[in-house]
Image: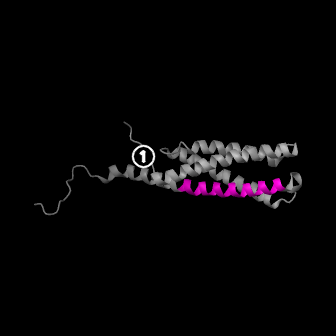
Amino acid sequence: MEYKLEGNPWTFGVFMVFNVIFMIVGIGIATVGIYVVLDVLRADWYNISFAVLGVAIIISAIIGHKTRFSQAAMNVYMISLAFIFAAQLAFTLAIVIWSNFTHKIKYGSAWAVRIFMIIATTIIGVCLVVGFLYRKSLNEVNFSHKTAHSLSLPGITPLVRGSN
């Protein structure tokens, strides 16, 4: 039986809950992109970028489900999540600040998209923080496992108090 190192199980459980929410956000963002394309009947930078970002989030969330024992997968996940967070934040700020966005699609739809993007950015930020905490616990376990062998000194008997 192979022994696999894993990080803090509680942190991993919270990480998985937020990763499922992250995947739902990805599906929602891809759906928003498709909705905006159908609403304006034209493919522009903002609606195509929604769809592409949604697919990238879904792929990253799938990678996130495979990170329990793998530091390499966790590093790939964290790097992709950092890029996705930066892109999501840029898109959200552009849509919130860009006043012409409400003229591109219906007014009510524009505000719904803006609110959804703000919530999605917040969720991705929380995923980034929780992912960092699990990555830290995984690194600590791997470090302590690697140094455990170097701390035991073979051939030296430990001194037991009270024995002569």
Q: Say which residue label 1 marks.
A: 5
Q: Residue visible at 87% across and 43% down? A: 42
Can I make out residue 135 in this image?
no
Hey, what amino acid is under mark 1? Answer: Leu
Image-quadrant location for residue 56: top right
Q: Nearer the viewer, residue 95 or 143?
A: 95
Residue 43: percent from left, percent from top: 84, 43
Residue 123 belongs to the span the image colors magenta: yes
Image-quadrant location for residue 102: bottom right
Residue 1: percent from left, percent from top: 36, 36
Q: Main secondary structure of the magenta part?
A: helix
Q: Split into 4 quadrants, where in the image is the C terminus?
A: bottom left
Residue 84: percent from left, percent from top: 67, 50
**Residue at the extreme left:** 164
**Residue at the extreme top:** 1
Residue 22 belongs to the span the image colors magenta: no
Q: Which residues are magenta?
A: 108-132
Instruction: Estimate how packed mark 1 is, as few (under 14), some (14 to 19) or many (20 or more) residues with alpha carbons within 10 Å.
Output: some
